[in-house]
Amino acid sequence: MAARSAGRDWRWLMFVIAAIVIVLDRLSKLWIVAHIKAGHAIVVIPRVFRLTHVLNTGAAFSLFESIKSPLLVRNMLVGFSVLAILVVIVLLWRMGRAFTLTAFALALILGGATGNLYDRIRYAHVVDFLEVRIVHYHWPDFNVADSAIVVGACLLLLEILRPQKAN
């Protein structure tokens, strides 16, 4: 996606997009905590999609959850998240002047990383609640923040793989 307006600075919109992701993530997690007991689920589409309430002390999609030292995992994930957020903010500040696919992807990643970091610092776990099964494939439970990070990463990958115009 090419820059839409060379003279206009779109960074404010990229940070608004990140903030929207954070708000949607918080609201969805608060709803889950208020309506579904931890360890329970609501079937939305039988054998395909459930709303669950999982307390994830690991990384995205429950990675590292089985490591014996939860405090070590938490501290490593908090440190990594803070570093990643700072890198994304710098990249977004540099690239966000133009409304591009890259800037949009970075905004999604920033919002998702910040949403999960909030949970990890405040509660020492992240609430995951989206469970998807397709035929024999079962994805670990995830949340809005994880979704934003994955969509942002996929958009960045598409941007990298897209043929570049010669200048």
Image (tube, helix red, strand yellow):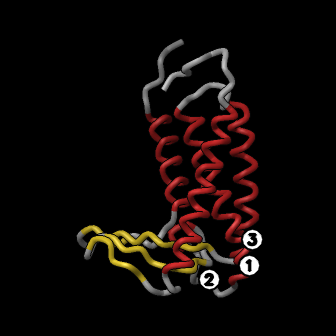
Element assignment for label 3: helix
Q: Mark 1 and mark 2 in contact? Answer it, CB < 8 Å.
A: yes
Mark 3 or 2, which is nearer the eye? Answer: 3
Left or right of 57 on screen, residue 153 = left
Characterize the local packing of mark 1: few (<14), some (14-19) or many (20 or more) Cα atoms within 10 angstroms.
few
Write the residue at 60% across / 75% down: 58
Residue drawn 67% across the image and 70% down it: 119
Residue drawn at 57 percent across, 80 percent down: 55
Closer-to-camera residue (67/47): 47
Residue bearing mark 3: 121
Residue 126: x and y in percent read 61, 73
In what element is the residue under mark 1? helix
| Residue topped by disc 2 | 67
Q: What's the amino acid at mark 3?
A: Ile
What amino acid type should be assigned to the residue bearing mark 2? Ile
Q: Is residue 48 left or right of residue 69?
A: left
- The answer to which of 10 and 89 lies nearer the viewer is 10
The residue that disc 1 covers is: 72
Label 3 vs label 2: CA separation?
Answer: 18 Å
- The foreground one among 51 and 102 is 51
